[in-house]
Amino acid sequence: MELWSIRNPLELDIIYSTGTLITNESLIDPDYISAYDWMAAELDARVKRPYKLCRYPVWLWKCWDAERSCKPDLRVRWGRKNEDLILLRLDIPDNLLLLSEFHLWHYALNGWYLPTNESDESSFEEALRKNGIDNKWPFPEPYHSMVVRSWRYMFAWEQLDSSYHGSNLGSSIQAVCWEIKREWILEVSRFRSK
Amino acid sequence: MSIMPKKAFQVSVFSTLMLLGGLAYADLKYPGDCKASKIIKAAKKGGCTVEMGAKHHKIKKGGSVVTLLPNTVKPNGTCRSIINAVNSQCK
């Protein structure tokens, strides 16, 4: 499958010198570690970690924005202003990837319940209200499990009600895998972030 | 000398502030305001801060994260939830 990933030049050096790139967990924002832990567990349930060192996945684009361009548009901001970056075009075996809807991923990042439709959202909020629980992460059980279970719809976005979630659902698809191997690189483009 | 009643004074000050600076809280509408620039502007107006990132922007209030905003916002459920979070917390 053809994918893209935006990396910094140092990461490209690591790929060329070691043959692979894995995620450096010290660079993950601590505010979102629980979402990353969850995504790592979801990937591990489908694709086993190749090395123990692979604690967190590598992020990629299957399609940045189908309404504009699946290839990431380098005219938008991708890093710090004027930062030198690399766009990799990759060919990665399908069975090593887990695809998800980029906009729905924000429900996990924000610790929100991902409803299937408006009535599902109202039912969840009503249950919280009745029990005097704030609609805010972290949730007590059984709501914690309900919230975390709801995030799985980011892998099955076509099952969600598009009249609630919008007809553009599925236009931005991200992917995760455990590593980027040198032999998967098809093209390297250097650019400067806007 | 006439003394303005306290309530009337408060109303007067509030009205003046409204005229001078507009609403001091985010008042975003879904789906019309589903644009990153509009959400960021409203969040700042409501006293939130925004940390710009590569794929997302982090909107914070008093050190706590209000929401993570994708740099490309579309009229969808994610935007609706983000608007709810910004409207309720950036004020």
Image: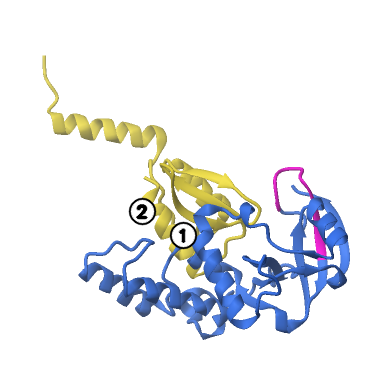
Chain colours: A blue, B yellow
Mark 2 residue element: helix
| Badge number at residue B72 | none
Using residue A94 as the reference point, say whether residue A136 is left or right of it. Answer: left
Please tell me whether residue A183 is drawn above or below residue A29 in the rendered image.
below
- What type is the residue that disc 2 sits on? Ser
Name the residue tied to disc 1: B82
Using residue A20 as the reference point, say whether residue B21 is left or right of it. Answer: left
Chain letter of the residue carrying label 1: B
Q: Quadrant of residue A76?
A: bottom right
Residue B52: % across, % down: 60, 47
- What type is the residue that disc 1 sits on? Ile
Using residue A110 as the reference point, say whether residue A47 is left or right of it. Answer: right
Magenta-highlighted residues? A77-88
Chain letter of the residue carrying label 2: B
Is there any visible trace of residue B30 in the rendered image?
Answer: no
Q: Quadrant of residue A71?
A: bottom right
Name the residue tied to disc 2: B88
Please tell me whether residue A90 is drawn above or below residue A109 in the rendered image.
below
